[in-house]
Structures are given as structure tokens and as C-alpha cells.
Amino acid sequence: MDNQKMGNFIFIMRKENKMTQKELAQRLHITDKAVSKWERGLSCPDLSLISGLAEVLGVTVNELLNGERENTGTTAKAEKVEPVLQYADETTKKKVRSLKILFADAWSLILLLGILVCSIVDLAVSGTFTWSLISDSSILLAWFAGYPVIRSGHKGVGISLAAVSILIFPYLYVLHLLVPSGGLLLPVGMRMAVIAVVYAWIIYGLFCMLRNRKYLAGAIVFVLYIPVQFLVNFCLSITISEPLMDEWDILSAVIMVVAAVVFWRLDAKGE
């Protein structure tokens, strides 16, 4: 919808009806500032106000949404309904976007408060920053991982994944400096991080390429888990003598195979 065109039409029809912005606002039980924003094309009326606004201005809903008077000829019903549906879809999307932004900002504020509380408590008790550096860096990593997804939904997954892929390594280095681990945290953590990041990108790529066949993508992800699990065990065995395969690994591999078969069958039914 063209907000500018609709706003200009509201302005013209308001003048024709000899109403001020304040009078129109009072008829609709809103503020005159809202009417001013409509007429300047800065915003559009809420879907719940469209019918009442059209009635007050003496126009049809279709004319209001199109921002112009209809021709005297007969207009097909589908053509009349389409602008209403389009407008409803756009206003709904705008509300969803606003809610996502609000939730993302609230999430950011909560995490910021968490950082402040941990830092203040640590400073008050220890006289310096000790354990709070661990919690603060963890919270920051959580923010970078969560904020794009919360704000943009599935469109933000790639951004979150890229952020985590970059930040996980300095994060592990910070933990290595702060947490006593006998020198094992960094070599083990780095190997596990590389495997996890690569696997996560493979999952992301599969679901992007097979966006219309999500069950098939899920089946492939379950199958790929088995070699990834073996690779993790192999890396651990080099450092801490972890066995390449135990009964729990075999059980999890069987579960992954069963899950892959189920998803593959679901995909076959959906074709």
C-alpha cells in the first residue's frame, strides 16, 4: 500500500467534509497527532480503524485503501477484496515486526542488567573483577547469538551463526585464562568449537537449500550426526583418552538412524 497516496486522500476527503484533524480524531477516538501522521504518509491507520474512517470520510474501504475514488463502472468483487487483504497482511507484518523489536530490546536490557549486577557484586565482594568476567563474557556471547534471531526471526539465523562462529574462539580463550583446567580447556574446547561450528553451518545450509523439504533436511542432519559424534570422540581420545565408541554412543547413533528414517518417510509422504 502507498501510505503517501492514502494520506493525501485522507487529507482531501477530510477537507471536503469540512473537518479539522482534531474533529476527525475525536470521531475515531484517537489523537490528532495520529491523523497528522496519516496525512503526511508517516504511518497508516490501524486495520481496526479502516471501516470507521471510511464511513466518516464518506468513501468505501476500497477507495480509502487505494487512495482514490473508484470509477463509476462496476468493479469486480475480487478487485475490491484484494486491497483489504493486502492492507491487513501489511499491517499484521508491521505489528509483528514491532513486537519482535520490542522483545529484542527487552532481551538486551535484561542481559545488560545481568552484566551490571554480576560486575557490581563481584567488585563489592572481591574488590576487583574475577568471576564476573566469565559471566559477563558468557552473557555477551548469548546476546550476539540471540539478538538477531529474536529481532528478525529466521532471517537472523545466519547473522547469529556468523557471530557465534567468530566470537566462540576468543570466548574460549577468555575461559582458558580465567578457569583452572590443567591446560585442557583451550585445546579441547577449540577442537569441539570447530566441529560444532562446521556442523551448525552444514545444518543451516541444508535447510536453506531444502527449504521446501524440511523433513528431508532433518533426515540428512540426523544421519550426519553419527560421523560428527565419531569425530568428537576421536578428538577427545587424543587429549583425554576418551574411547572412540561406547554403549551410549551406539544408542545415540541408533536413535539418530531411527529419527532419520522417520523424517525420510515424512518427506516421502509430503511429495
Image: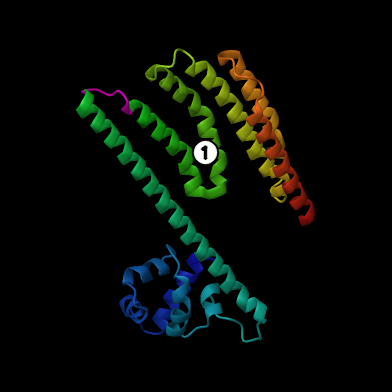
Q: State whether residue 52 is above or below residue 210.
A: below
- Depth order, front residue of 93/265: 265
At x 24% / y 32%, what residue is drawn? 121
In the image, the segment drawn in magenta is 127-132
On the image, numbered disc 1 is attached to which residue? 160
Q: Residue furthest front?
A: 247
- Depth order, front residue of 252/232: 252
The image quarter containing residue 34 is bottom left
Residue 143 x %, y %: 43, 38
At x 51% / y 64%, what residue is drawn? 92
Residue 171: tell me if it is visible.
yes
User: Total marks drawn?
Assistant: 1
Is residue 61 on the magenta stretch? no
Q: State whether residue 135 is above or below residue 210.
A: above
- Depth order, front residue of 76/229: 229
The image quarter containing residue 19 is bottom left
